Image (cartoon, coloured by chain):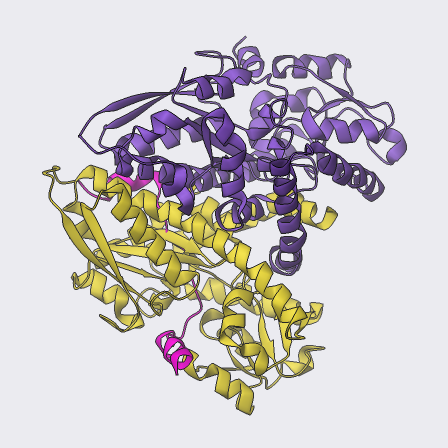
Chain colours: A purple, B yellow
Amino acid sequence: MKRRDLLGALAVGGALAVTGCSKEQKSDGAAAVNTGQTFKWSMATTWPKDFQGVGTGANYFAKLVNDMSAGRLQIKVYGAGEIVPALEVFDAVSQGTVEIGHGASYYWKGKMPVAPLFSAIPFGMTATEINGWLYHGGGMALYRELYAPFNVIPTVGGNTGCQMAGWFKRDINSLADIKGLKMRIPGLGGEVLARAGGEPVLIPGGEVFTALQTGAIDAAEWIGPYNDLAFGLYKAAQNYYYPGWHEPGTALEIIINKQRFEALPADLQAIVMTAAQAANIDMLSEFTARNHEALRSLITDHQVQVKRLPDDVLAELKKHGDAIVRESASADQISQRILESCTGFLASVKDWSKIADLSYMQTR
Amino acid sequence: MKRRDLLGALAVGGALAVTGCSKEQKSDGAAAVNTGQTFKWSMATTWPKDFQGVGTGANYFAKLVNDMSAGRLQIKVYGAGEIVPALEVFDAVSQGTVEIGHGASYYWKGKMPVAPLFSAIPFGMTATEINGWLYHGGGMALYRELYAPFNVIPTVGGNTGCQMAGWFKRDINSLADIKGLKMRIPGLGGEVLARAGGEPVLIPGGEVFTALQTGAIDAAEWIGPYNDLAFGLYKAAQNYYYPGWHEPGTALEIIINKQRFEALPADLQAIVMTAAQAANIDMLSEFTARNHEALRSLITDHQVQVKRLPDDVLAELKKHGDAIVRESASADQISQRILESCTGFLASVKDWSKIADLSYMQTR
């Protein structure tokens, strides 16, 4: 029952995402004068409470703020559904129902079609690259501009790192095996799969395990070894495919109500933004350290078959992915500027990553 | 003249290195009671003042602390040589001449032979991996244990990301081209080159350009495109080789005098450690964003030839690198535990990186 509750709370139809702080923080709004006042904030999250990696990352952020402010700003973290359902976190922050939220920008695609570019896009940036774009490549200013009309200040506050392509009941040997494949894969990744001939299925997280086990679906993506092991998905399918082409370095976000942020004195504003930046690297580090242990356990203790998607399948998915990302931005001016900034940074940073991290990892 | 001054100040015989904060921060020592006292600290660094990436990263850390503490803890950053020379920063912090320092652990190899494992080792961890080890893989506790006898509390506070193999006047086509090669490459990388038949030369940073231009040396490693472009090394050699096998994700450190840290109230202690963690990701992001731009300029504006070291050369270097890392730890118990933790984490995390970031970057 407990696992189903967790899964249910995660049934937000999306994948996962990064948030943090930037040097532009002072431009967020004028700060109030420090009168020694104590503030108590509620943080609504899109995750089950204490959920591994993403939920514990939100807790870590809140603890940093509490410790650094000596209790002058106390943030209490709530799991999805405790105050508002996961998909209503953005509205709750926008309207001031809660002061702050923790989630992923691709959950707000209905409101802002270009929003997923700040979390993860198919064949997009790695964690290191998206942080480069957000903190030092112009991304953060655009992110804030996009959210400003909603009275919301976003920053990046976590990253899952590269995810896995998912769990498959049968082998994927060629494009033919994708045709008609019923797979639980939400968001832009699902749109890509559909164009490649598959059938993306929208299934709440709580029902994924059973759907996969009974054969109602042929495959399902979740996160990566750390979370997938805990959810027991290896009991429902034995083929674990990589790479996570649909979410190569998912950025998570911290979103703050503008008036509540501006009501803070400058030191507390700096504390919030810096805690977000620290929580960003801390979460990626947690995923890095736990994923390799979980991967080993899946292979050694649970006889999971870890396999790479065939090249022709990946090439076909990439073709559709690039097109869908371009189409995802509305025609309005801010969306177009975000699309250009994001895809321009990616096109250039790829050349560096190729001779740096990629070439190095191929060598050792 | 100015460039020579900068280079001279960087003549510390090492490469570059990471620091930051961890959840173990409370175990560093009991905090003083907050009496509203203001503290003024001096930060000695191993970098020229305001040096791109590493020096600006130290400045960013100090700004975060100043802002978050509303001026209750003011940190003034000094370049190498302003208070003490680069290679005396550790002693200055240990003895309390300055409260805090910013540098790289491999500079203290003479004192602690195992210290380079916390910055960069040949064929070691990437930036993401070393952060996983330090923040969530047991590395930070060992780091603190190693420095404790010196009255110094270390944390990670920056990362250069993967560096470049260096600038070569002639092509490297096979192992034969390494024999007798005079190359400016300090530290463990130099030891590896020597075993492969090359001649590592210790040249202060300030003399690298001239030595390379006049042919006194055949090759030189520096950092990566961002810094190398600024130093004009492309004018002295046209072949720019990758990957940076000797420094694949160099962690930089922030080191703090133990008594001075313990004299801070708990909120200021948390502010220092969190600022270090935020500065860690911010520096890597700056290098990520600037390296790809600089790489493009080197290729397009300066006709630099970017080439990959041949496989047999890399294989030979790796063979010696692995041996040298094992030999670098003393026989004492703490060194052996650090060696086991570091190499054990690397061996396991590599399997995850291979199917995650590596496989993904090969695909897109």
**Would residue A207 appear left or right of B144 to someone viewing this image?**
right
**Would residue B251 appear left or right of A342 to someone viewing this image?**
left
**Would residue B137 appear left or right of A188 to someone viewing this image?**
left
Queried whether the magenta region covers residue B63, the answer comes back as no
Q: Is residue A208 visible?
A: yes
- Nearer the observer, B329 or A364: A364
- The image quadrant that residue B239 belongs to is bottom right
- The location of residue A310, given as percent across then percent down, is 81, 41
Queried whether the magenta region covers residue B22, the answer comes back as yes
- Nearer the observer, A360 or A123: A123
- Point 64% across, 68% down: residue: B314
Q: How many marks?
A: 0
- Nearer the observer, A124 or A31: A31
Image quarter in which the N terminus of chain A is found: top right
Q: Can residue B204 be seen in this view?
A: no
Task: Residue lying at the far right in this picture: please name it.
Answer: A176
- The location of residue B65, given as percent across then percent down, is 28, 47
- Point 60% across, 43% down: residue: B352
Asked if A330 appears above or below B318 in the picture, the reply is: above
Task: Residue lying at the far front in this picture: please name it.
Answer: A333
- The location of residue A174, given as percent across then percent down, is 87, 36
- The location of residue B116, given as percent across then percent down, is 41, 62
**Would residue A311 appear left or right of B69 to someone viewing this image?**
right
- Nearer the observer, A51 or A291: A51
Task: Residue lying at the far top in this picture: please name it.
Answer: A1
Asked if B174 appears above or below B40 in the picture, the reply is: below
Image quarter in which the C terminus of chain A is found: bottom right
- The image quadrant that residue A232 belongs to is top right
Q: What stretch is highlighted in magenta?
A: B1-30
